[in-house]
Amino acid sequence: MASHFQRAYPPAQPTTSQVRWFPFQGHKLLVREQNGQLALLHGEDLSSAGLNVSATLYIGTLDDTSCMACEVSSEQELPAGWREVDLRALFGQVDDITYAVAGYASVLLLWQRSSRFCPVCGSATRQEHNTWGRHCPDCGTCNYPPVTPAVLVLIHDGDRVLLTHKPGWGKRYSVIAGFVEPGETLEECARREVLEEVGVEVTDVTYKGSQPWPFPHQLMLAFTVRYVSGEPRPDLEELDDAAWFAYDALPELPAPLSLSYQLIAQWVSSRQKTSHNRI
């Protein structure tokens, strides 16, 4: 049976005696190394494991295990057997649901650090009951953990796809990406980003999926669009190349954990099926 994560909101307290810890030092998760494998801490008090923790949050239950997020001082030297790992590097070393909970934990810890004072008047904020929101008792301002929407756009034209490259990416190419602006629909954003970054006209904006991206708090929304006209011209403030590639002759792609990779892989699969049917 697939694992299930049930979110909890303040002032909820752990409901099970089994605990899984998600301790962070800055933006990196702390894990143990056991027999060459990474492992999260289960069931122990973190002080007995040699970690001095603060900002402990109960964030929900994973099956019958309570999930606790917490912070460890950046000045603490880690005990033997412990190491810090970037969330990107954690992908593939734990199951998908545990990876998702780790991302959720990092976002909530960041929110707790950054929301202690009102952005309007500077007063200390208070916890909103049954939410992760914070309200200001002086001016009444309420804020909640931010979710920043961004689009990923794959431009296709028959058996070829238009991919872009940024300085510093090595040999890796990817799809168009950009943040949604105020007053803009997702479809408008997809068309605007394409026009701004590579200067081509597209149509048939089609939603393909989404992915939370806790770096620090994006929600990525994937689309495909069909090429109509125009010669690709990369915006040199953002990109240094934009080029067409055949579905069976692609360059180096983003890491498999990313929605951009999954979007490209899904399109390639569809072209392979179409090609097979033409035979």
Image (cartoon, rainbow, N blue to C red):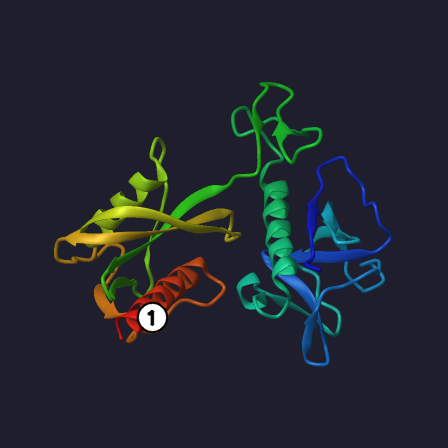
Question: What residue would you read off at disc 1?
Answer: 272
Percent coordinates x, y for residue 117 in the rendering = 60, 32
Identity of the residue drawn at 35% across and 73% down: 252
What residue appears at the point 64 percent right and 54 percent down from the top-left corner? 101
Where residue 266 sits, quadrant-wise, is bottom left
Above or below, 157 against 150 in this view is below
In the image, is 278 to the left or to the right of 23? Answer: left
Indicate the position of residue 20 as horizontal and vertical percent values: 76, 57
- In the image, residue 95 above or below residue 184: below
Q: Secondary structure at mark 1?
A: helix
Q: Is 115 left or right of 70, judged from the image as shown?
A: left
Instruction: Give whichever of 60, 80 is nearer the camera.
Output: 60
The three-letter code of the residue at mark 1 reads: Gln
In front of the other: 181 or 110: 181
Residue 168 seen in this snapshot: no
Q: Image check: 28 left or right of 205?
A: right
Q: Residues within 10 Å of mark 1 (few under 14, many from 20)?
A: some
Q: Position of residue 96 (x, y in %)?
A: 60, 61
Q: Is residue 5 in sight in this rendering?
A: yes
The percent coordinates of residue 73 (x first, y second) are: 69, 55
> In percent of the image, x 80 and y 41: which residue is there?
13
Residue at the (67%, 72%) spot, across then down? 38
